[in-house]
Amino acid sequence: MSPARKPSGPSDEALVRRSLDGDRWAFTEIVDRYKGPIYNVAYRMLRQREDAEDVAQEVFLHVYRALDKFDLEQRFSPWIYRIASNLCLDKLRKNKNVTISLDAPLAEDRGLYRQIPDAAEGPPELAANAETRREIQAAIDALPEKYRLIVILRHTRDLAYEEIAEAMDLPLGTVKTRLFRAREFLRRYLEGQRMDLED
Amino acid sequence: MLMKCEEVYHFLQAYLDGEIGPEEERKLEAHVRLCPSCKKKLFSLQGLITSIEDLDEARPDEGFTKRLIERLPEIAEPARRTDRGGFWRRFLGPRPRG
């Protein structure tokens, strides 16, 4: 859920204004409000906890540096997701230039499931759920990056089409086309079929 | 008039996101009631979306905010701040030596 939609407390934009006016609590509140969502996007894109932490930290440092450039007439949420999207895609580009151990993603997968009860020791339905989650995650990981990011923003952060278009600097029509194609890809992938998506 | 299956697909996807007008919604629902193939596709996409939304949230490690705040005094203050970073230094206490 997008934090901007939570009704309680001052709006994000009010917090930015207060940060710029020297309110010391306001920036910490922005970080606390967004660290979970931003880390999650980074983790789902990068699939390595360390990379996700680095990128999430960079996002907030960037926000802090650029706070005065934020247009107070606009909404904060697409702005921070835009910074996060750019930094995640940058990081993925950089990572492509280094050799990746084939064992690394598996080791990292075990890291993710650290946070949920050990499915293997639980009742069968828990194991089945864990298996489903693994399959879904594998399907998402198989998406080309620009499709994967849209799916993540839409379905883990509940961003509307227009917010995704703002965050990724894409026309609305492109967002819809890519999201629909990505979901079709995922649906077929989970049924054992393959579908080509241009990279 | 009922929509054709090819027309439905686009609306069906937007329907799942709640980004469809009431008129299209009415037409889509009328089609899906009578078309087993589109109904199957709708349920399958709905199941997919629910599964993605049910994925566990990965959480940043404890101390994320503290680590971030420790780095802030190293960079420029945001413009128009009225004080020059005394808060962050007070927040963190004296800087460690070395």
Image: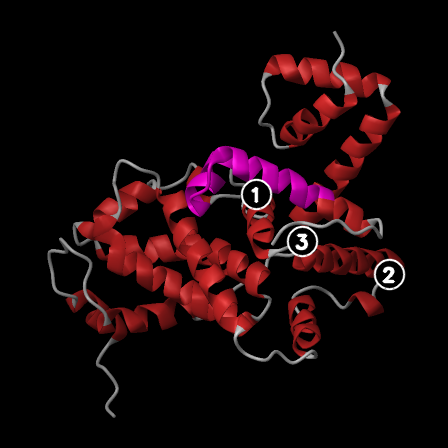
Residue at the spot 67% in from the left edge and 53% down from the top edge: B55
Q: Amino acid at mark 3?
A: Leu
Q: Chain of mark 2?
A: A
Badge 3 density bin: few <14, some 14–19, many ≥20, Cα 10 Å: some
Q: Chain of mark 3?
A: B
Alpha carbon separation for disc pair 3 and 1: 13 Å
Q: What span is in magenta?
A: A161-184
Question: Is A170 colored magenta in this rendering?
Answer: yes
Q: Nearer the viewer, mark 1 or mark 2?
A: 1
Residue B55 shows which numbered tag?
3
- Helix, strand or loop at label 2? It is loop
Q: Is residue A138 above or below residue B47?
A: below
Question: In terms of image quadrants, where is residue A179?
Answer: top right
Q: Nearer the viewer, mark 2 or mark 3?
A: 3
Q: Position of residue A7 (x, y in %)?
A: 42, 36
- Helix, strand or loop at label 3? It is loop
Q: Main secondary structure of the magenta part?
A: helix
Badge 1 density bin: few <14, some 14–19, many ≥20, Cα 10 Å: many
Q: Is residue A70 above or below residue B33?
A: below
Q: Are marks 2 and 3 on the same chain?
A: no
Q: Amino acid at mark 2?
A: Pro
Q: Amino acid at mark 1?
A: Arg
Q: Nearer the viewer, mark 3 or mark 1?
A: 1
Alpha carbon separation for disc pair 1 and 2: 32 Å
The residue pinned by badge 1 equals A154
